[in-house]
Amino acid sequence: MATKGLFAVNFEVFGLVQGVFFRKYTVQRAKGLGLRGWCMNTPNGTVQGQLEGPETKINEMKVWLETKGSPSSRIDKAVFSEMKSIEKYSFSDFEVRH
């Protein structure tokens, strides 16, 4: 069943985002917005992930990733792929990947 108005976007957040519970807070925020997808630490010291959900909720999450993060994090920049329309969810939840 196709869900109307579903979108997906990839992200990468740069700064002090590892070892500061950034992924934990990202999961909490994404789930709070009803988004699905994942996030993970990279070997480059960034956090990458993918978001799926309604455009308005993804946009809220993008602002959070760019400006808020976890209390101890320092966000230098966040980069997002072009938002694309999807037919259905690829994920059943939002999780941390290792």
Image (cartoon, rainbow, N blue to C red):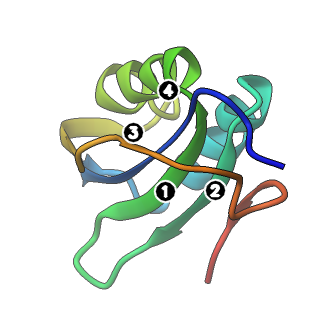
Local packing at callout 2 (Cα closer than 10 Å; few below 14, some 14-19, many 20+) is: many
Local packing at callout 3 (Cα closer than 10 Å; few below 14, some 14-19, many 20+) is: some
The disc at residue 50 is 1
| View extreme (front): residue | 1
Of marks 2 and 3, which one's residue comes earlier in the chain? 2
Local packing at callout 4 (Cα closer than 10 Å; few below 14, some 14-19, many 20+) is: many
Q: Position of residue 38 (x, y in %)?
A: 61, 61
Report which quarter residue 31 is drawn in.
top right
Q: Determine whether 43 is above or below 80 in the image.
A: below
* Label 4 to label 1: alpha-carbon separation: 11 Å
Name the kind of residue labelled 3 in the image: Ser
| Residue position marked by numbered label 2 in the rendering | 37
Asked if labels 2 and 1 touch by Cβ distance under 8 angstroms, the answer is yes
Q: Is residue 21 visible?
A: yes
| Residue position marked by numbered label 4 in the rendering | 61
Name the kind of residue labelled 2 in the image: Gly
Q: Position of residue 47 (x, y in %)?
A: 39, 61
Regarding mark 1 in the picture, which secondary structure is present there? strand
| Foreground tag (3 vs 1) | 1
User: Which residue is located at x 77 percent, y 30 percent?
Assistant: 34
